[in-house]
Image (tube, rainbow, N blue to C red):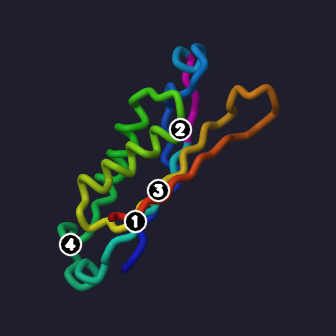
Amino acid sequence: MGIITLKNIRTYSYHGCLIEESKIGSDYLVNLDITTDLAKSRLSDQLADTVDYVLLNHIVVTEMAIRSNLLEHVADRIIKRIFNESQSVTRARVQVSKLNPPIGGDVESVTIEIEEFRS
């Protein structure tokens, strides 16, 4: 088994419960790591034998573009799509961070993290 990690995928998205958040938007960072069997790709050196990083990034960017009230909901959609579109993924962990959240204080970011295993 092996882990593929995508760090600090940057998006500008419109998530949040406040009306202003849906109009103004905010900067987000997403970290993703997946567990998959890398034995075949280690030997073959073929993209078809691994999980394509481009696919993972595309899933994150596409789901981050769909507005949600909660970061938990966005993260859940990301994980579900990864499991649906890549059958070899056995575990997915996603962190979604809202930078400079409007919570009435000097807070750099707020982050949620969800981890799921294929059942």
Residue at image position (54%, 45%) is 96
Q: Viewed as shown, does residue 113 lie left or right of 91?
A: right
The span from disc 1 to disc 3 (Cα, nearest Å) is 11 Å
Q: Quickly name the residue at label 3.
A: 32
The span from disc 4 to disc 1 (Cα, nearest Å) is 17 Å
Mark 1 is on which residue type?
A: Arg
Q: Quickly name the residue at label 2.
A: 71
Using a 10 Å C-alpha cutoff, classify the residue at mark 1 as few (fewer than 14 neighbours), some (14 to 19) or many (20 or more).
some
The span from disc 2 to disc 4 (Cα, nearest Å) is 32 Å
Q: Which residues are magenta?
A: 24-28
Asked if 118 appears above or below 66 in the picture, the reply is below
If you read the primary sequence from the N terminus, does the residue marked by circle 4 or circle 1 appear first?
A: 4
Q: Position of residue 76 (x, y in %)?
A: 43, 45
Residue at image position (32%, 53%) is 82
Mark 3 is on which residue type?
A: Leu
**Depth-wise, is mark 4 or mark 1 nearer the camera?**
1
The span from disc 1 to disc 2 (Cα, nearest Å) is 19 Å
If you read the primary sequence from the N terminus, does the residue marked by circle 2 or circle 4 appear first?
A: 4
Decide: marks 1, 3 in contact (CB < 8 A)?
A: no
Residue at image position (33%, 45%) is 58
Q: Quickly name the residue at label 4.
A: 49
Residue in the foreground of this view, choosing between 115 and 64:
115
